[in-house]
Amino acid sequence: MKKESFVLYDKWLLFSIVSLLILGLMMVASSSVMISTKYFNQPFHFLIHQSIYLLLGIMLGMVVMRVDTRVWERASVWLLAACLILLVLVLIPGLGKVVNGSRRWLAFGPLLIQVSEIAKLAMILYLAGYLVRQETRSQNEFFDFIKPLGILGLVAFLLLMEPDFGATVVISATVMVLLFLGGVRIRYYIGLLVLMCSSLAVLAVTSPYRMRRLTTFLNPWADQFDSGYQLTQSLIAFGRGGWFGTGLGSSVQKLLYLPESHTDFMFAVLAEELGLIGVLFVLCLYSILVVRGLMIGYKSYEQTRFFASYVAYGVTFWIGLQAAINMGVNAGLLPTKGLTLPLLSYGGASLVVNCVVLALLLRIDHENRWLSLGL
């Protein structure tokens, strides 16, 4: 038996995941020192919480890596139904926890669950199963093309009630990609694309705070002490970083100048401390993750494991798109969306779900390798 037969998982994918997790812990420790000291009188409150959530995510990931993908296919509809119930519960005052004006979390004792993260996975699993079940009809019948869009519309409505516009954009874009890969008729697809883009644009311009975000990112310096404050501080962090950065732990912007420096804008602190070299390294890690994920999806497609293929494509696109949006927001290329940087930013629920979905991707790769060996 050849040496590569003993390789059960994609080594490059594992390398990128582990590297991002280690770098994430390092940057959470660095970026949250001041805010942790201010509110909790000790510097490593957020690091300790992130480490606990990472341990939980690894444990759940190990369980997921032992579960056959066919189990996920059979349970996909029930998982979506459970997710819809959670999306309703989070909107009920007293059950949903409000943070920064958004009701996105359910509290179970000390644990906070961000339901929108679960919704992303549930929609991918449901749509992958639906495309497999309706392989022929979804390509030809307009009604069968519309049904999953009704589910998407319901999920998007509940997310916008929180409100969580960023998660709505990510889920909608992921659904569009999976429908395209599922081979829907091009005229349906183009019509849906126009309708969805128009709907998102209307949602953006009809909400005062979203409209303010859209106009602010175009020229944050016009109101740098109010609506443009966060973005201008982020751009200052990028400017201070230069080629090689100021050094790990030496950021000035994290000293309570840059809001959300350990969550949504942690990438700006990374750019300041590690410089352009650090930014390019992170981009390289995400590129490896996306390329290997797409290769896993294609391998599953070659083996006619269509559910696994759709899930691999969906998970890879989700992680890649969310990372691109977050980095674009930090660099002032996109309006603020309120999305964390996968595997790097502080956020327990996001980290746990990311560990689970990447463990699912590793499981798909593992099954591909065993099937290619005839086992």
Image (cartoon, rainbow, N blue to C red):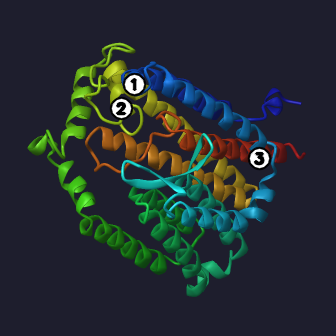
Instruction: Give the secondary structure at mark 1.
Output: helix
Q: Nearer the viewer, residue 307 or 152?
A: 152
Q: CA distance from mark 2 to mark 1?
A: 6 Å
Q: Are marks 2 and 1 in contact (CB under 8 Å)?
A: yes
258 or 231, which lies in front?
A: 258
Residue picked out by circle 2: 261
Which comes before the other along the chain, label 1 or label 3?
A: 1
Residue 288: percent from the left, percent from the top?
54, 35
Side (left or right) of 344 relative to 216: right
Circle 1 sits on which residue? 31
- Can you identify the residue that label 3 sits on? 368
Question: Pointer 3 and pointer 2: residues touching (CB < 8 Å)?
Answer: no
Question: Residue sitting at 72 percent across and 67 percent down?
Answer: 78
Mark pair 1, 3: CA separation? 39 Å
User: What amino acid does circle 2 point to?
Assistant: Ser
How many residues crowd mark 3 within 10 Å: few (<14), some (14–19), many (20+)? many
Check the picture and name the quadrant holding the N terminus: top right
Amino acid on which disc 1 is placed: Ser
Label 1 Cα neighbours within 10 Å, binned few <14 / some 14-19 / many ≥20: many
Sequence-first disc among 2 and 1 = 1
Whole-percent x and y of residue 211? 23, 60
Which residue is rendered at x = 57% and y = 59% of the image? 119
